[in-house]
Image: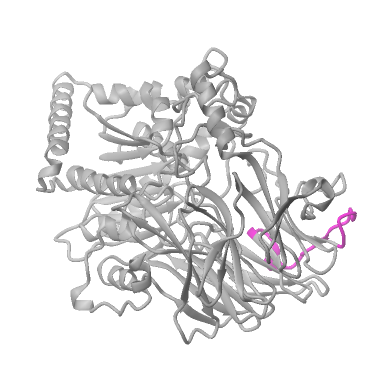
């Protein structure tokens, strides 16, 4: 982790000698997260995560820094390989807990093959585990006096391995928990070891085998490290949940109990009069005087209305609820923090940002660290990598505490800065996007677009696969487009907004001479992938595309059809049943039935557990020399292994430079790649010429 330590002292780059914004530099950005302020309000603990290409993993390091900011942060402990979500591969938020005297931080870490609770001295003098359980620690809490730590575990590591091997020997019974599209045995590597996964609940959430084993709570005496089992009555008192609230209240999206009394701040979905919208885009902020109250006090101020509020927390020792609102319309996915005084009803702005201000760049809905007078947040903008900031809660004054990515920030500002743009489509719908503009091009450059959400520092859009600044540095304008925030229930209306956004922005930028409308590429993951294929089939605006996600196909339905949660969600969001039940709807929306309308080359870079569900349209495209398919082993919905991420970045850069600029990287390791792509280009040109000779469309 020497790169992180050295990054503390990075000097401003000489503007005349800016380094290239390579895909590797974007991948190796130091991500910050999980800021927690000490009990005395003088220090903050936070974690830095950074990719290691050589070891194909991520390192995480815990730091402690004085809030005056006069001295750099102190490295206090190794955080191990970041714990990740099974379903999407993203690192889990994992804030530390301070001891009451401010001398120690406690945190979960996967080190030496197990998840334990560790403690590290705030002065950096020592760090060691305080749990040595045969099972991985799921959760923990520290007693008020700091003398006892309670932690929960499930099945032991040996029990999980034994269950996996028993299934292997006796055969896996296929039921609605089995991830049929993935391998049956140890098909996931989220836990830093090959592990078998199972569906856990709604939609595509997954977890390890035996994950539903109930919690068992234990206690560690921190003076002696002796351990004892806890009875049910001795387990930590859990925070109120939705189940604890009176019946009849709207189901809250988030609860925040006051630390000193029984009041509860909550977010509930705002009502909508439009039956075509999925509820919950906008939310309402309210407060209950206690968990038995059935009459919430609502925030009625203008600043609380029609907002996408993503986080709430009480300011210690006050009647003020701090809430984070994300502007998903005019200002393009930017965050601001406000304070609501529940006793007076007054709402005041604390910080208005041009990007994200949250508890982590990768998590726009994780709270900042908070004391009675200071917020510590991770701030980031489209072309400014994450940094640590202290914000005065009373005045909103902002101070930078730590900038590990300052050199990259400076080089992007010189080479490929981003700017927020606005435009409207033919229906008058307003779109926003972040445009990275190439410098010193001889004429209007090609354009690459990705469509979904554009939060914080934009390495590669949602899923982080298209290196936007690298594309711009190499002469391709790169645009991240924000989807309209309202989630339309009708599939065609929801996806066709993407086609309309792309067509209208191409007209907008080409009219100003800023791009070449004949050279436009598009890429996306998940919903962005679906919109990319929809645009390819329903528009002639694109010259090439790249996707990393599944669209609705009969194979996709078949692989998941055992699960009630999947079938009901598909009915609601896509109006799809089985092929024989809704044949007309399938023909309307699935790319399987639109192959004759797709005339552009498409690059597929898929996680192993999803690529099989694309083969009923990807393989026909490949067979007619319009598709090139790559699948990455041991990857979840969002790829996370550094070598895989780098390969995806570089191949996407090569792909769009080839199709939009007719450029080939001369590196010898890429010769086969270009041989395949040249054959695709020749075959597509010959087919197009033959169609034209015979009067085809």
Relative depth, front residue between 205 and 641: 641
Q: Residue at x 30, y 80 (%)?
A: 11
Vertical placement of residue 681 versus 398, above or below: above
Q: Is residue 124 magenta?
A: no
559 lies left or right of 28: right
Answer with the quarter of the image where residue 542 lies. Answer: top left
x then y, percent, for residue 236: 77, 55
Q: Residue at x 30, y 45 (%)?
A: 648
299 lies left or right of 636: right
Residue 235 visible somewhere in the drawing: yes
x then y, percent, for residue 473: 23, 61
Answer with the quarter of the image where residue 685 lies. Answer: top left
x then y, percent, for residue 152: 68, 49
Magenta span: predominant SS is loop
Residue 95 visible somewhere in the drawing: no
Q: Name the image quarter holding the C terminus.
A: top left
Q: Name the image quarter holding the N terminus.
A: bottom left
Q: Residue at x 49, y 60 (%)?
A: 79
What segment is highlighted magenta in the picture? 289-310
Relative depth, front residue between 142 and 197: 142
Image mark count: 0
| Residue farthest toward the top in the current orientation of the protein | 580
Relative depth, front residue between 429 and 183: 183
Q: Is residue 294 magenta?
A: yes
Answer with the quarter of the image where residue 295 lies. Answer: bottom right
């Amino acid at each position: 982790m020497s790169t992180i330590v050295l990054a503390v002292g990075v000097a401003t780059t000489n503007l005349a000698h800016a380094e290239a914004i390579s895909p590797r530099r974007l991948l190796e950005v130091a991500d910050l997260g999980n800021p927690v302020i000490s009990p005395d309000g003088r220090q903050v603990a936070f974690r830095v995560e950074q990719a290691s290409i050589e070891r194909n993993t991520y390192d995480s390091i815990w730091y402690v820094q004085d809030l005056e900011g006069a001295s750099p942060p102190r490295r206090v402990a190794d955080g191990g390989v970041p714990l990740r979500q099974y379903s999407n591969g993203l690192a889990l938020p994992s804030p530390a807990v301070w001891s009451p005297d401010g001398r120690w931080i406690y945190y979960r870490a996967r080190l030496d093959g197990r998840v334990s609770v560790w403690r590290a001295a705030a002065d950096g003098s020592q760090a060691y585990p305080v749990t040595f359980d045969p099972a991985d620690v799921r959760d923990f809490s520290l007693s008020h006096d700091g003398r006892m730590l309670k932690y929960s575990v499930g099945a032991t590591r040996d029990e999980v391995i034994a269950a996996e091997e028993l299934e292997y020997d006796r055969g896996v019974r296929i039921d609605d928990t089995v991830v049929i599209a993935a391998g049956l045995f140890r098909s996931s590597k989220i836990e830093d070891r090959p592990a078998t996964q199972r569906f856990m609940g709604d939609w595509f959430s997954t977890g390890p085998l035996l994950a539903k084993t109930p919690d068992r709570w234990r206690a560690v005496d921190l003076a002696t490290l002796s351990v004892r089992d806890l009875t049910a009555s001795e387990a930590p008192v859990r925070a109120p949940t939705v189940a604890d609230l009176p019946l009849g209240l709207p189901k809250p999206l988030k609860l925040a109990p006051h630390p000193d009394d029984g009041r509860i701040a909550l977010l509930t979905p705002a009502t909508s009069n439009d039956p075509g919208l999925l509820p919950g885009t906008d939310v309402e902020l309210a407060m209950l005087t206690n968990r038995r109250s059935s009459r919430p006090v609502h925030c009625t101020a203008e600043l609380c209305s029609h907002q996408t509020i993503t986080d709430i927390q009480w300011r210690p020792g006050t009647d003020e609820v701090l809430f984070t609102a994300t502007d998903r319309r005019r200002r393009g996915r930017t965050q601001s923090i406000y304070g609501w005084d529940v006793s007076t009803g007054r709402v005041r702005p604390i910080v208005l940002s041009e990007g994200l201000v949250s508890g982590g760049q990768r998590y726009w809905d994780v709270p900042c660290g908070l004391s009675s007078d200071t917020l510590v947040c991770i701030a980031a903008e489209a072309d400014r990598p994450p940094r640590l900031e202290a914000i005065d809660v009373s005045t909103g004054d902002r101070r930078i505490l730590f900038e590990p990515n300052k050199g990259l920030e400076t080089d992007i500002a010189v080479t490929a800065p981003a700017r927020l743009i606005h435009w409207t489509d033919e229906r008058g719908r307003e779109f926003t996007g972040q445009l990275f503009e190439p410098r010193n091009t001889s004429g209007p450059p090609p354009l690459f677009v990705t469509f979904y959400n554009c939060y914080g520092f934009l390495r590669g859009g949602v899923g982080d696969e298209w290196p936007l600044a690298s594309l711009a540095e190499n002469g391709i304008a790169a645009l991240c487009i924000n989807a309209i925030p309202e989630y339309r229930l009708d599939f065609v209306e929801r996806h066709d907004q993407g086609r309309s956004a792309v067509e209208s922005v191409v007209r907008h930028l080409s009219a100003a001479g800023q791009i070449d409308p004949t050279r436009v590429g598009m890429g996306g993951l998940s919903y962005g992938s679906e919109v990319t294929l929809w645009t390819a089939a329903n528009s002639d605006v694109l010259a090439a595309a790249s996707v990393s996600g599944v669209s609705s196909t009969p194979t996709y339905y078949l692989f998941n059809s055992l699960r009630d949660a999947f079938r009901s969600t598909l009915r609601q969001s896509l109006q799809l049943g089985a092929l024989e039940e809704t044949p007309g709807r399938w023909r309307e929306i699935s790319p399987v039935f639109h192959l004759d309308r797709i005339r552009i080359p498409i690059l597929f870079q898929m996680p192993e557990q999803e690529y099989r569900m694309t083969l009923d349209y990807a393989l026909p495209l490949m067979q007619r020399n319009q598709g090139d398919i790559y699948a990455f082993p041991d990857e979840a919905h969002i790829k996370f292994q550094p070598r895989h991420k780098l390969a995806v970045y570089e191949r996407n850069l090569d792909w769009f430079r080839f199709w939009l600029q007719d450029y080939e990287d001369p590196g010898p390791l890429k010769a086969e790649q270009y041989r395949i792509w040249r054959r695709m280009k020749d075959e597509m040109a010959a087919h197009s010429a033959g169609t034209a000779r015979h009067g085809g469309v």
